[in-house]
């Protein structure tokens, strides 16, 4: 399978994005932002649809819409945004805008499916360089702000008492989520992007309590899920995104079993 250029491109792009999502996911789960990741992915769908309508690079539309959406959430405040009404309104509006731009642009159904479910095998070298640049940027920012972000994510009361700029950290992380979401849509699509950004991290938390361990294990699960999805998709011709999500879900359910067994052993001891 590696004799084909599109497979090589898919593995390179998928591995980079999985590493980024694995690291981001640990803090998304710790900060209880899964619902926002889901919302931003839908906003990204509208952005990509607008880009197709306007005839510009899809990544530009994705970045523009998701960054504006993340900034809006940050200004509203995460607690206020968690209300069901806010979530449902923004999700509905984003989907509606996406469908509107696709319809007035006379865009083919294949492109719509690509936006919703991803198309990792359609990535070329130009896309890879974009992914390399964005992944490096996201990981660099995470590394630079790691201590503050870890403190605020896992001990919010302590971080506030220590005088950390809580609001700035929150908005900055939301913007970073928007950037990561924009590039991840190309792999698993707008409907499943939040799965790659949250499920590996949720599974990793069941196996270890160490923050560093969560980051390593979450990244490993994400990378293996992408590799498994690409191989299984190649040999079965089924959607790659399905196998990616199935692998992540299997790791999570196995983790719940492992966690329960560990608790029973501790009680017995």
Image (cartoon, rainbow, N blue to C red):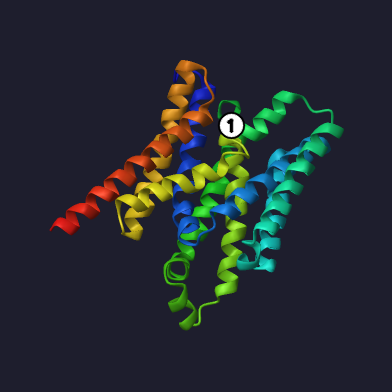
In the image: residue 164, left or right of residue 50: left
Quadrant location of the N terminus? top left
181, above or below 27, in the image:
above
Where residue 174 appears, x then y in whole percent?
A: 60, 60
Where residue 14 appears, x then y in whole percent?
A: 49, 36
In the image: residue 225, left or right of residue 192: left
Point out the residue furthest to the right here: 104
In the image: residue 92, left or right of residue 229: right
**Which residue: 18% across, 57% down?**
266
Q: How many marks?
A: 1
* SS at mark 1 in the image: helix
Q: Is residue 55 visible?
A: no
Quadrant of res 194: top right
76, above or below 244, in the image:
below
In the image: residue 213, left or right of residue 267: right
**Which residue: 69% across, 67% down?**
76
Where residue 264 appears, x then y in whole percent?
A: 21, 53
- Name the residue tied to disc 1: 125
**CA neighbours of label 1 inside 10 A, class few (<14), some (14 to 19), many (20+):** some
Q: Is residue 6 visible?
A: yes
Quadrant location of the C terminus? bottom left
**Which residue: 47% across, 58% down?**
27
Closer to the camera in the image, 74 or 18: 74
**Which residue: 87% across, 34% down?**
104
105, above or below 63, in the image:
above
């Amino acid at each position: 399978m590696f004799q084909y250029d599109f497979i090589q491109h898919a593995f390179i792009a998928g591995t980079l994005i999985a590493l980024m999502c694995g690291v981001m996911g640990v803090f998304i789960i710790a900060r209880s932002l899964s619902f926002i990741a889901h919302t931003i992915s839908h906003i990204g769908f509208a952005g990509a649809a607008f880009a197709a309508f306007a005839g510009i690079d899809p990544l530009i539309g994705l970045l523009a819409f998701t960054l504006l959406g993340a900034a809006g959430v940050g200004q509203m405040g995460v607690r206020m945004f968690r209300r069901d009404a806010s979530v449902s309104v923004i999700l509905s509006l984003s989907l509606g805008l996406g469908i509107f731009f696709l319809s007035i642009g006379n865009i083919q159904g294949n492109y719509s499916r690509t936006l919703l479910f991803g198309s990792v095998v359609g990535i070329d070298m130009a896309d890879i360089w974009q992914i390399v640049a964005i992944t490096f940027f996201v990981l660099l920012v995470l590394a630079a702000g790691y201590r503050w972000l870890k403190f605020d994510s896992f001990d919010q009361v302590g971080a506030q008492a220590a005088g950390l700029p809580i609001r700035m950290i929150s908005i900055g992380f939301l913007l970073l989520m928007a950037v990561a979401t924009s590039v991840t849509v190309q792999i698993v699509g707008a409907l499943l992007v939040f799965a790659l950004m949250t499920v590996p991290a949720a599974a990793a938390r069941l196996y270890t309590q160490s923050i560093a361990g969560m980051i390593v294990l979450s990244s490993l699960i994400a990378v293996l899920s992408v590799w498994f999805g690409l191989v299984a998709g190649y040999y079965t011709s089924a959607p790659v995104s399905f196998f990616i999500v199935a692998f992540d879900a299997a790791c999570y359910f196995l983790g719940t079993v492992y966690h329960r067994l560990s608790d029973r052993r501790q009680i017995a001891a």
